[in-house]
Image (tube, rainbow, N blue to C red):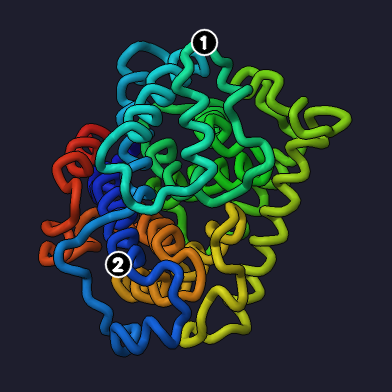
Amino acid sequence: MTTTAVRKRAATGCLTGLALGDALGFPTEFDDVPAILAECGPWRDMRLPTPAVVSDDTQMTLALGKGLRTAAGRGVLGPELLERPVREEFVAWYRSPENDRAPGRTCLAACELLEDGNRRWQDASQTGSKGCGANMRVAPVGLLPGLGDEQRAGAAQLQSALTHGHPTALAASDLTAHAVHLLAHGAEPTGLVGLLRSYAYDNRTRYHERWLGDLWTRGHDPDPEHFIARGWDECLGALDRVQEALRTVSPETDPCLATGEGWIAEEALATGLLCFLWFVDEPLTALRRAACTAGDSDSIACLAGAFAGAHLGSDAWPAAWADRIEYRGDLLALGALWDA
């Protein structure tokens, strides 16, 4: 971590914000905005539920974080060191009695296959799915200290590919981890979309074979470059919609109308990013806007909270909220490790 990231405790802030967004959006997922307003009142006054229970989004973020912690403790992070502990944590989540928070079908199907230790992970990957279940959990990759650009991109895409193997899921996870990393290390939010667009263009035909192996052959593409470019092109389109919405859309309207409902990877990234950028200096307002949406509210708010916490650090979140979040001890343990 740089001095900036350590000083503001970016990892603790990011993980806490992600979980708070999850808890705020979990009860409103599957509801439309009029129903949410009828239940909760004005969206700017939404209160954190009591108890502050999270969904599978935070559970899988913690599973990935623990897998990363194990892998990083064994040596220089590479695909061989990363795949096994993350796979084991995902399967442990799959088998946990606490896995009762409406988890996504893609994660369940892939984890059932990953449980067979003799099966190559590429044969478990759900290559037709670009659901948001991979990029809502990827923030720990952007927080792990000491990674080079290739390691961070490869790790973000590999953790996605264990469950969601569609190229857009890979690209969106890579972009989300990159955004968290940039914000944690002091990037200005006003230039963030431009930085992400440049990153997407630079990586548009870069297939990380060392990390992904022959995953691309499941996509019926002529070559790996064509496979991965499909994902980056969809993400670039989503970033275009964010830029346009920042210029033309009022934050009083449902952001899903501008950037999508978030059930799929590039829309979750775009809508979570939009909510954060609308309210850069008002993190609770960003979470409330993300939670009062017609789409995948908990995942959208997860991402908005991760971006806000990475940018502002742990002081972004009032103790009256942060101290009540489920899995607080696990979140603090990972945050403290990476903030140190």
Amino acid of disc 1: Asn
- Whether residues under marks 1 and 2 lie with C-beta atoms below 8 angstroms apart, the answer is no
Give the quadrant of residue 87: top left
Q: Nearer the viewer, residue 44 or 143?
A: 44
> Can residue 5 be spotted in the picture?
no
Image position of 98 (left or right of 154) = left
> Can residue 260 be spotted in the picture?
yes
Q: Is residue 291 above or below residue 192?
A: below
Mark 2 surroundings: few (<14), some (14-19) or many (≥20) residues within 10 A:
many
Which residue is the site of mark 1? 118
Residue shown at the point (32%, 43%) measured from the top left: 99
Q: Is residue 190 above or below residue 139?
A: below
Residue 24: give its label. 2
Q: Nearer the viewer, residue 298 or 306?
A: 298
Image position of 211 (left or right of 223) = left
Q: Nearer the viewer, residue 264 or 211?
A: 264
Residue shown at the point (43%, 40%) measured from the top left: 142
Give the quadrant of residue 140: top left
